[in-house]
């Protein structure tokens, strides 16, 4: 699968141009928050969501930003991959962090 990388977003399209997988991670003050992961039902169970989160994490770190996650899938993924450092996870934690 070919992924397209843009600022704050990695995604894939089908042959009709429809988005069939994506992860979004807006950035603010040096922290990129993975807030949304989507994989079309036809692709589920193939590890694509995990690959998207990993690609996002690698991109965030390569840009010198810290990683946060509010997307439930991403939070679970990071719990299973402690090699990736999180600033915060879950909606409540990230809201508290942003106030500082």
Image (cartoon, grey):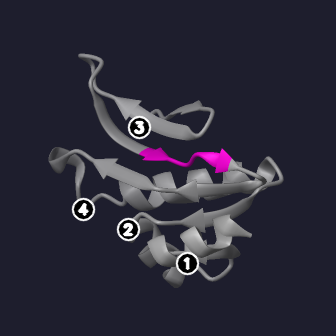
Around disc 3, counting alpha carbons within 10 Å, would you say few (fewer than 14), some (14 to 19), or many (20 or more)?
A: few
Residue bounds of the magenta highlight: 23-27
| Mark 4 or 1, nearer chain start | 4
Mark 2 secondary-structure assignment: helix
Reply yes or no: does residue 28 show up in magenta.
no
**Location of mark 4 (residue):** 45
Where in the figure is residue 93, as x and y percent of width and height? 55, 78
Residue visible at 34% across and 42% down in the picture: 21
Task: Look at the numbered disc 4 and give the secondary structure of its residue.
Answer: loop
Q: Earlier in the sequence, mark 3 or mark 2?
A: 3
**Residue identified by numbered label 3:** 1
| The N terminus, quarter of image | top left
Q: Quadrant of residue 49?
A: bottom left
Residue 85, numbered label: none
**To which residue does mark 2 refer?**
73
Dot 1: few (<14), some (14–19), or many (≥20) neighbours within 10 Å? some
* Quadrant occupied by the C terminus: bottom right
Above or below: residue 51 compared with residue 93:
above
Whichever of callouts 1 and 3 sits on the residue coming sooner in the sequence is 3
Q: Is residue 26 magenta?
A: yes
Query: Marks 3 and 2, Cα distance to the nearest angstrom?
Result: 20 Å
Label 4, label 2: how far apart the Cα atoms are:
13 Å
Residue assigned mark 1: 93
Sequence-first tag of 1 and 2: 2
* Of callouts 4 and 2, the N-terminal one: 4
């Amino acid at each position: 699968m070919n992924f397209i990388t843009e600022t704050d977003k990695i995604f894939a399209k089908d042959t009709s141009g429809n988005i069939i997988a994506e992860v979004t991670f807006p950035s603010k003050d040096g922290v990129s928050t993975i807030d949304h992961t989507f994989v079309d039902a036809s692709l589920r169970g193939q590890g694509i969501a995990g690959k998207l989160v990993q690609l996002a994490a690698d991109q965030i770190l390569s840009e010198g930003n810290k990683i946060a996650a509010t997307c439930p899938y991403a939070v679970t993924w990071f719990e299973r991959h402690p090699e990736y450092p999180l600033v915060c996870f879950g909606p409540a934690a990230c809201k508290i962090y942003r106030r500082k």
